[in-house]
Image (cartoon, rainbow, N blue to C red):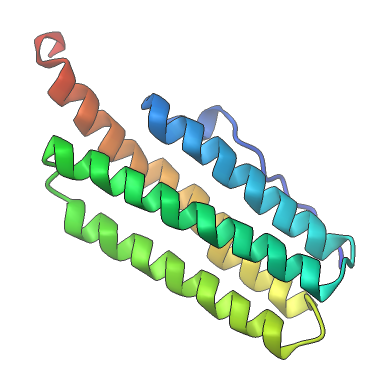
Amino acid sequence: MTYDLNITFDDNLITGNKTIDTQHKELIERIQNFVTACQNGDSKLKAIKMLDYLDEYTNFHFKEEEKLQENAGYPEYEKHHEKHEEFKKTIQELQEYLQDYEGPTEQFSELVQKNVIDWLFGHIKTYDRSVAEFIFMRENPDRY
């Protein structure tokens, strides 16, 4: 399986909120490990393990992010939460897909690209960035 994916945390993904950014770095590292496991033709078991590891961290990160939103009184909380639920469902579907096949297929890698990598990077650049800006403005009212 060939991938030409650049899965790195770069300046485009910085939200300005230290907690969120630190967790995003970890999340992206886990996605990288998962994709590498698929790329290397590693065993189905390793790909499943890496996906479980990603799933576990995703759940932790989303809870933390939502806690920040609630504490700050973020007005778009419900919408953001729905997006998180959507992503969790995607991870579940990928887990089911891996169970049903001998291992990661070309189609599987396309799903990962579209539903995990593209989704997450897009989500960070829009939804998460607006959360960070909202929190920053709440904490620094004198700067505006």
Quarter of the figure that contains the C terminus: top left
Above or below, 33 against 96 in this view is: above
Above or below, 134 against 27 in this view is: above
Above or below, 35 against 7 in this view is: below
The picture quadrant where one finds residue 35 is bottom right
* Left or right, residue 126 beside residue 47: left
Residue 8 percent across, percent down from the top left: 66, 39
Residue 57 percent across, percent down from the top left: 52, 52
Residue 84 percent across, percent down from the top left: 36, 60
Q: Is residue 127 visible?
A: no
The residue sitting at 79% across, 66% down in the picture is 46
The residue sitting at 73% across, 51% down in the picture is 33
Viewer-nearest residue: 111 or 88: 88
The residue sitting at 43% across, 44% down in the picture is 124
Viewer-nearest residue: 143 or 72: 72
Looking at this view, name the residue that lies furthest to the bottom: 100
Above or below, 23 against 106 in this view is: above
Quarter of the figure that contains the N terminus: bottom right
